[in-house]
């Protein structure tokens, strides 16, 4: 698995017009961007378009881009902004009633459904339901922390909030989950978050 230093070196090479380094950046982060984008929109074409536009803009503007501390956080932040703009366009998708951003949903992974017995799938669906009952920002923080493995600083950058807000929202989410999830689903929640 590449390190932050490797990511930073490839990014620096990309900024210096190295097409191979840019290709490596795209390949390394495409799956994470697609997965993150799918949490905002079920329309796969919109997500693909936004990712493609993001990479085109990165290449076209490479001489003006910063050297971020975390390439992954920088790309997730850029995609998030692009999706918010795209989803607010009337010809793309309607804006959700409660926000100007797309909603953020958890679903059991296909691998879990194929591998585990029916009771585990049912438990996973219950855990998904509990996660989806959290406020959108808390769901997003859970996703970024446990699915994208971002630290507080990176999450703060992606969501454009302070590190303290990240900590507060994460603690609220975990506290709420501990209170509402029955004990027999606790192990399923843990495996759901670390899978």
Image (cartoon, rainbow, N blue to C red):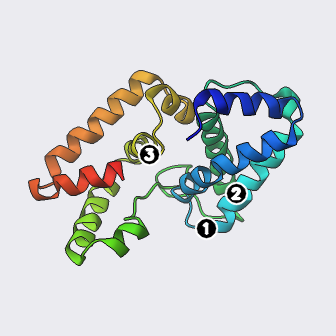
Q: Secondary structure at mark 1?
A: loop
Between 104 and 123, the one nearer to me in the picture: 123
Q: Horizontal placement of 29 versus 140: left or right?
A: right
Write the residue at 47% across / 23% down: 162
Residue at which label 2 appears: 89
Q: Residue lying at the far bottom in this picture: please name it.
A: 118
Q: Secondary structure at mark 2?
A: loop
Q: Residue lying at the far left in this picture: please name it.
A: 183
How crowded pointer 1 is (Cα within 10 Å; few <14, some 14-19, many 20+) is rated as few
Write the residue at 53% across / 35% down: 159
Which of the marked residues, 3 or 1, is nearer the chain's N terminus? 1
How crowded pointer 3 is (Cα within 10 Å; few <14, some 14-19, many 20+) is rated as many
Task: Locate residue 14, reporting x and y percent.
Answer: 81, 34
| Position of 43 relative to 23 (above/below) | below
| Disc 3 from disc 2: Cα separation | 22 Å
For the N terminus, the quadrant is top right
Write the residue at 50% across / 29% down: 156
As drawn, the label of residue 140 is 3
Residue at which label 1 appears: 43
Count of marks placed on residues: 3
Which of the marked residues, 3 or 2, is nearer the chain's N terminus? 2
């Amino acid at each position: 698995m590449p390190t932050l230093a490797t990511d930073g070196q490839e990014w620096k090479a990309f900024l210096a017009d190295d097409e191979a380094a840019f290709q490596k950046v795209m390949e390394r982060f495409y799956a994470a961007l697609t997965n993150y984008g799918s949490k905002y929109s079920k329309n796969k074409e919109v997500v693909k378009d936004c990712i493609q536009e993001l990479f085109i803009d990165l290449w076209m503007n490479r001489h003006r881009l910063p050297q971020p501390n975390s390439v992954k956080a920088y790309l997730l932040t850029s995609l998030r902004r692009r999706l918010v703009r795209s989803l607010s366009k009337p010809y793309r998708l309607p804006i959700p009633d409660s926000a100007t951003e797309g909603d953020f949903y958890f679903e059991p992974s296909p691998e879990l459904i194929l591998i585990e017995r029916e009771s585990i799938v049912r438990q996973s669906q219950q855990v998904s339901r509990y996660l989806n009952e959290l406020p959108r920002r808390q769901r997003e923080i859970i996703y970024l922390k446990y699915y994208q493995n971002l630290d507080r600083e990176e999450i703060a950058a992606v969501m454009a909030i302070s590190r303290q807000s990240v900590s507060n929202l994460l603690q609220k989410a975990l506290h709420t989950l501990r209170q509402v999830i029955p004990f027999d689903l606790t192990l399923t929640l843990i495996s759901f978050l670390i899978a």
